[in-house]
Image (spheres, rainbow, N blue to C red):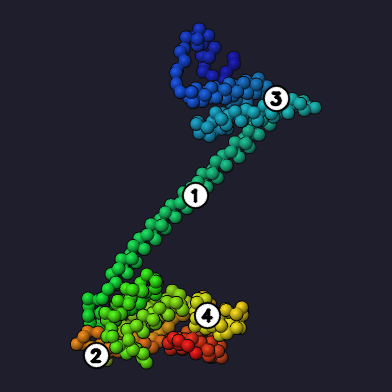
């Protein structure tokens, strides 16, 4: 008795009259074309199944037993497996020496098993790839969300720093000074006006800054610091007031040596002694310090006027010599670096030589 997994058990009892009485559904042309295509694929599968079953009756059973793919795509894969089986059967028949039925079954079964195993491996690999892609996309989205939150947080902090501080005491002004300096160093362009307004608000017009005077000196120092170094950040480990009008704050300044550092602070490290503008080559010492992170310890002195609640005297001191010596390892190289530098070992900027 002939049987096929693609035909109902009572296929032979269905009459032509019953099939003729069925009314065809009316629908869109696209649906009709898809129905025609599916019918053609099924007819092709039926013919391939019939040919394979006639030549080797166990082929349909082997295919349905080995194929564990989802039902949605099984019909398409079934057609491919049947074509493979028919090709193998045709090769067996074309062989010069006869092959027994049992061996034919084994050959076809093994070929189908290999093909289905390969297909399953491809499916698993594709699933893993899609999983990795989805994870990578999720990581990117999470990273974007974190960056947006961080940007909003930093913008909020910078907005809070804009303007004159409300805590007009020496302690409060010192903390505000460090916070404003860090904010300005990170974004010197957009924060220039806000930083200028802040410094004018806390300092007297004739504030004394070492050998200079005037509140414009401070904003110029900030600008140079942000230009000369990268990733500038100042920490405030402690403060003390040796007298009622003087506050001394200990500072730890962390900076990165960039190409701007070499260009503006150490132009003599180039063979043309002009930061390479004449096409010279940088010395090995420049390569050794480029990209290095320096930790500079220092202090800031605020002379406070209790009458105007403003800074009337300002003095900074930083030890740039020690981190350079630690980085280079010998005094000879350190001496050469600062010999014609436009920045001093105590971190003062030189306008001209």
Instruction: Point out the tag, 3 or 4, that comes first from the N-terminus.
Output: 3
**Dot placed on the residue nearer the N-terminal end, 2 or 3:** 3
Image quarter (top left, top right, bottom left or bottom right) of the N terminus: top right
Left or right, residue 68 beside residue 172: right
Residue pictured at 30% horizontal, 76% vertical? 197
Query: Residue 133's mark?
Result: 1
What SS does tag 3 mark? helix
Q: Quadrant of residue 55?
A: top right
Which is closer to the viewer, label 1 or label 4?
A: 4
Look at discs 2 and 3 and give the one toward the viewer.
2
Q: Give how far across and how far down residue 119 sits, in percent.
A: 58, 38
Tell which of 308 and 45 is nearer to you: 308
Residue holding disc 2: 245
- Give x and y (percent) for residue 180: 33, 75
Q: In this orientation, which residue lies closer to the viewer: 329 or 107? A: 329
Residue drawn at (53%, 87%) of the image: 337
């Amino acid at each position: 008795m002939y049987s096929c997994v693609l035909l109902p058990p009572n296929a032979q009892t269905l009459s032509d009259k019953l099939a003729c009485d069925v009314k065809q559904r009316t629908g869109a042309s696209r649906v009709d074309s898809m129905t025609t295509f599916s019918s053609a694929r099924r007819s092709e599968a039926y013919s391939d199944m019939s040919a394979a079953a006639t030549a080797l009756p166990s082929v349909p059973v082997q295919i349905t037993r080995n194929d564990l793919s989802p039902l949605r795509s099984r019909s398409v894969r079934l057609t491919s497996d049947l074509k493979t089986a028919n090709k193998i059967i045709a090769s067996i028949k074309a062989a010069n020496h006869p092959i027994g039925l049992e061996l034919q079954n084994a050959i076809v079964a093994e070929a189908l098993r290999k093909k289905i195993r390969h297909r399953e491996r491809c499916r698993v690999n594709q699933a893993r790839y899609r999983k990795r892609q989805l994870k990578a996309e999720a990581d990117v989205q999470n990273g974007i969300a974190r960056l947006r939150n961080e940007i909003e947080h930093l913008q909020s902090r910078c907005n809070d720093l804009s303007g004159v501080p409300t805590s007009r005491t020496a302690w409060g002004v010192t903390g505000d000074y460090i916070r404003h300096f860090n904010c300005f160093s990170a974004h010197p362009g957009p924060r220039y006006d806000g930083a200028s307004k802040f410094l004018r608000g806390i300092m007297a017009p004739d504030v004394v800054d070492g050998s200079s005077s005037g509140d414009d000196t401070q904003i110029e120092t900030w600008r140079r610091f942000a230009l000369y170094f990268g990733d500038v950040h100042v920490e405030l480990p402690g403060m003390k007031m040796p007298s009622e009008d003087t506050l001394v704050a200990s500072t730890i300044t962390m900076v990165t040596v960039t190409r701007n550092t070499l260009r503006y602070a150490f132009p003599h490290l180039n063979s043309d002694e002009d930061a390479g503008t004449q096409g010279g080559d940088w010395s090995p010492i420049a390569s050794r310090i480029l990209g290095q992170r320096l930790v500079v310890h220092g202090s800031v002195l605020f002379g406070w006027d209790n009458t105007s609640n403003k800074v009337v005297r300002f003095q900074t001191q930083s030890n740039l010599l020690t981190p350079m010596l630690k980085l280079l390892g010998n005094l000879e190289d350190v001496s050469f670096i600062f010999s014609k530098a436009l920045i001093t070992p105590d971190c003062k900027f030189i306008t001209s030589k």
